[in-house]
Every structure is written in structure tokens, then in C-alpha cells.
């Protein structure tokens, strides 16, 4: 029997929002694609297709975090957004670049890859949240990406071993560097909420719209996994 790791400590808002969409959340972190990553049964072509789309996703995702620098209302918010942009471009990208290079695909080719509909839907949803909304709208659309992969990394950590087909992927998302990003994003979300809606966010008239913003991004995460599986059907 597998024992579940303790819920990661990504802040107060994470716990509230995760609970507020628990069915959608479980569908995201327990998706069949994730099970295939865990036991190594995910076909390699599906993984490669996903990694190429995910690189494109991360390009837009980094742009959205850069928009966070533009929309921030305090130096701390600016710094945390800038640090996340740096971590995405100079750390997380490496996993994708190395995976694709091992298959003879260079970074510029991946950068120019044609986007699947699921990639367009999710990335433009996040960017639009920041363009039409305020900093909070943006950050809540961005958050499930970090928290979900952080939680999945911890869930899959025990299943990893040297020579596992997805060893590097699991090591990246369960590793200290990525976990540290999740904790910092959790702190940023808590700060942003406190600044704009106060200490009792669930009593705010804005809460249901905030939860809806978060939940939609969670659903788009599941659709993104589904895109990866479709590649081999
Ligand atoms: C679609 C998606 N969501 C989240 C992550 C983790 N940054 C990612 N790489 N790709």
C-alpha cells in the first residue's frame, strides 16, 4: 500500500483553494498521464510530444510571470515574480531542452513548435487573466501550475530510481529547487490576497470569482495531460 506524503506547505490560500475544487484537483494530480509517469508505462512518443508542448507552454507562462512584474503593487511582489521568471527560463527550461536534444531536436525548433489547442487554451487563459484583470487574477491563474507539479513531484518521488524512464522529470519536480519555488509562490499568493482582500479572504465578495479563476486553471491542467495522451491514440 502506498502512503501519501503530507500535504505540501504552499501556504494558506493553497490549502483553501485546493479544498474548494478537490474533485478537479484530484483529477489533475491523479491523471492517467501522471500514473504513466509514475510507473514508467507512459509511451515515450507521448512524453516527447508533451515535453515539446510543455516547453511552448512554459514560454508563455514565463511571459505571464513577467506581466506579474508589470502588475505588481509592491517591491516584494515584483521581486518574487522576477525570481519566478528567472527560475523558469534558467532552470525548468533545461529539463525540456535536454529531453528534446536527446531526441535530436534543438531548442529553436521546440520554440517554434506548432501549438496544440490545449496549449493555446491554457496559456492564453493565463495571459488574459493578467491582461483584463489585476495582479490577483493573474496570480491565481498562474498558481495551480506550480502547486500541482510540486505536489505531483512529491507524490512520485518514492517511485523514482536510477534508470527510471522519467527519472529526470520526477527529480526536477520533487527536487529542492522546484519545491522552493512552490513555497515562494505560496507566500506570494498569500501576500497578494492579504493586501487586496484582507485576512478573511473566504468572507470577501470576491472569493467565489477567485476560486473560479483557480479552478479553471486546474481544469486546463487536466486537459493538458489529456493532450499528451491523445498524441499516441
Ligand atoms: C502544463 C504545466 N503545468 C505546470 C508546470 C510546472 N511548471 C509545467 N511545466 N507545465
Image (spheres, rainbow, N blue to C red):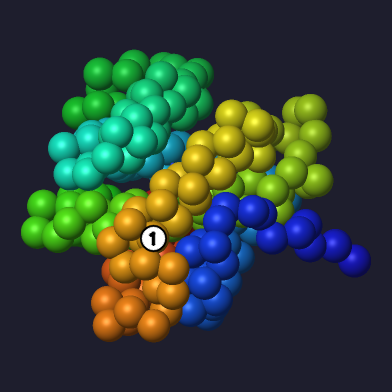
For disc 1, the marked residue is: 194
Height in image: 139 above or below 53?
below
The secondary structure type at the circle numbered 1 is helix
| The one of 66 and 167 positioned closer to us in this rendering | 66
In the displayed structure image, the side of residue 190 where residue 133 appears, left or right: left
| The one of 182 and 225 positioned closer to us in this rendering | 182
Question: Measuring 40% from the left and 73% from the top, which residue is drawn there?
Answer: 201
Q: x%, y% of residue 148?
A: 52, 55
Residue 150 visible within the image: yes
Question: Measuring 39% from the left and 83% from the top, which residue is drawn there?
Answer: 203
Height in image: 62 above or below 144?
above
Res 86 → quadrant: top left
Q: x%, y% of residue 219?
A: 38, 69
Question: Measuring 11% from the left and 52% from the top, which residue is drawn there?
Answer: 131
| The one of 73 and 117 positioned closer to us in this rendering | 73
Q: Quarter holding the C terminus? A: bottom left
In the displayed structure image, the side of residue 73 where residue 233 appears, left or right: right
User: Is the residue marked by circle 1 packed among few (<14), some (14-19), or many (20+) residues within 10 Å?
Assistant: some
Amino acid at each position: 500500500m502506498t502512503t501519501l506524503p503530507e500535504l505540501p506547505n504552499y501556504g494558506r490560500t493553497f490549502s483553501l483553494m485546493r479544498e474548494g475544487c478537490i474533485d478537479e484537483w484530484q483529477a489533475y494530480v491523479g491523471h492517467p498521464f501522471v500514473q504513466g509517469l509514475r510507473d514508467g508505462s507512459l509511451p515515450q512518443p507521448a512524453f516527447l510530444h508533451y515535453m515539446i508542448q510543455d516547453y511552448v507552454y512554459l514560454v508563455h507562462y514565463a511571459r505571464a510571470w513577467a506581466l506579474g512584474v508589470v502588475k505588481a503593487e509592491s517591491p516584494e511582489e515584483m521581486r518574487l515574480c522576477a525570481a519566478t521568471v528567472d527560475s523558469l527560463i534558467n532552470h525548468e527550461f533545461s529539463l525540456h531542452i535536454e529531453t528534446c536534444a536527446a531526441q535530436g531536436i534543438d531548442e529553436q525548433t521546440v520554440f517554434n513548435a506548432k501549438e496544440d489547442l490545449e496549449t493555446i487554451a491554457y496559456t492564453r487563459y493565463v495571459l488574459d487573466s493578467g491582461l483584463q484583470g489585476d495582479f490577483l487574477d493573474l496570480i491565481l491563474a498562474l498558481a495551480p501550475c506550480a502547486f500541482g507539479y510540486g505536489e505531483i513531484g512529491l507524490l512520485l518521488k518514492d517511485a523514482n530510481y536510477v534508470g527510471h524512464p522519467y527519472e529526470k522529470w520526477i527529480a526536477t519536480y520533487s527536487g529542492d529547487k522546484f519545491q522552493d519555488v512552490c513555497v515562494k509562490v505560496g507566500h506570494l499568493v498569500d501576500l497578494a490576497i492579504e493586501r487586496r482582500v484582507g485576512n478573511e479572504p473566504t468572507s470577501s465578495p470576491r472569493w467565489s470569482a477567485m476560486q473560479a479563476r483557480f479552478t479553471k486553471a486546474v481544469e486546463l491542467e487536466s486537459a493538458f495531460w489529456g493532450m499528451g495522451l491523445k498524441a499516441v491514440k
